[in-house]
Image (cartoon, rainbow, N blue to C red):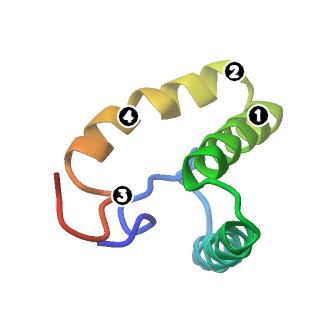
């Protein structure tokens, strides 16, 4: 299952072209991760840095409260496999 397939936008009125832009952006991030791993950076460090950057950007864009509400939904999404691409643990 794609990490973006069940992603609920912070703004439910977003047009389909914004969702497409998110898919393209995800591909760019995957490429950046692959390049950073080739340069010897640890995947865990990359993931933590990416999460921090993402949360910072969401707070800057939507504010603390909207981002916190968005983050509150993440545990259930994780448990349901929304971010799982291979074998589930």
Q: Which residue is mark 1?
A: 56
Looking at the rendered structure, which numbered label has been put on residue 83?
3
Q: Which residue is mark 4?
A: 73
Q: CA distance from mark 1 to mark 3?
A: 20 Å
Report helix, strand or loop for mark 1.
helix
Residue placed most toward the observer, 11 or 69: 69
Residue in the image at 61% along x and 61% along y: 14
Image depth: mark 4 or mark 3 in front: 3
Q: CA distance from mark 4 to mark 2?
A: 15 Å
Image coords of residue 32 (percent x, y):
73, 71
Q: CA distance from mark 4 to mark 3?
A: 13 Å
Mark 2 vs 1, N-terminal side:
1
Tell me, yes or no, whether the two marked residues, 1 and 3, touch with CB atoms within 8 Å: no
Image depth: mark 2 or mark 3 in front: 3
Looking at the rendered structure, which numbered label has been put on residue 64?
2
Report helix, strand or loop for mark 4.
loop
Left or right of 30 on screen, residue 9: left
């Amino acid at each position: 299952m794609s990490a973006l397939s069940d992603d609920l936008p912070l703004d439910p009125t977003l047009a389909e072209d914004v969702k497409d832009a998110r898919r393209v952006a995800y591909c760019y991030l995957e490429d950046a991760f692959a390049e950073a791993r080739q340069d010897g950076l640890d995947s865990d460090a990359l993931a933590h840095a990416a999460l921090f950057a993402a949360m910072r950007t969401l707070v800057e864009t939507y504010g603390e409260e909207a981002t916190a509400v968005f983050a509150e939904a993440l545990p259930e999404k994780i448990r349901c496999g929304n971010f799982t691409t291979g074998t589930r643990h």
